[in-house]
Image (cartoon, helix red, strand yellow):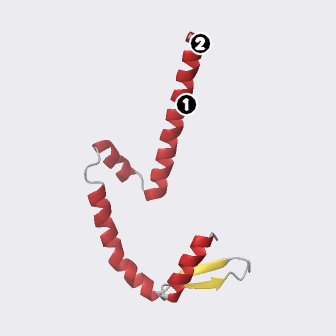
Amino acid sequence: MQPGTSAALKQMEHRGLVKPTTDPKDRRSVRVFLTPKSRTLLDKLIPIAAKVRDQATSDFSEREDAFDKLNKDGFAGLLMFLDKQRERVEKEQDLKSQEYAIAA
């Protein structure tokens, strides 16, 4: 676990939101389970998060909105999409650089 992750989990455990247990198959690993208190909190937070997402994306273009609807992976899928776009732009820049080198 990353240092920030450990600190966050300790705070969540202190607040009664998670229950860490040692993995019986690998004592170096820790399994983290949600408590009933955290599940109640999630039930309240998910609609709020959805409303914030809807407000943040309300001015997205139809293409962006369609991508959001097609992509069921949420944020991870968005990161993959952006990474592919970055790769595409980098390839285009490399091709243009090669064209300029040949022309010069």
Q: Is 8 in front, or is 47?
A: 8
Give the image location of residue 42, x and y in percent.
Answer: 39, 78
Q: Which residue is mark 2?
A: 102
In the current view of this chain or complex, which residue is farthest to the front?
104
Q: Residue at x 48, y 88 (%)?
A: 15
Q: Which residue is mark 1?
A: 91
Mark 1 Cα within 10 Å, few/some/many (few <14, many 20+)?
A: few
> 55 above or below 1?
above
Q: Residue at x 51, y 41 (%)?
A: 84
Confirm whether residue 73 shows in the render. Answer: no
| Res 33 → quadrant | bottom right
Amino acid marked by disc 1: Lys
> Left or right: where does residue 84 sit relative to residue 66?
right
Give the image location of residue 85, x and y in percent.
Answer: 48, 40
> Left or right: where does residue 41 sit relative to residue 35?
left
For marks 1 and 2 on the same chain, the one whose residue lies earlier in the sequence: 1
Amino acid marked by disc 2: Ile
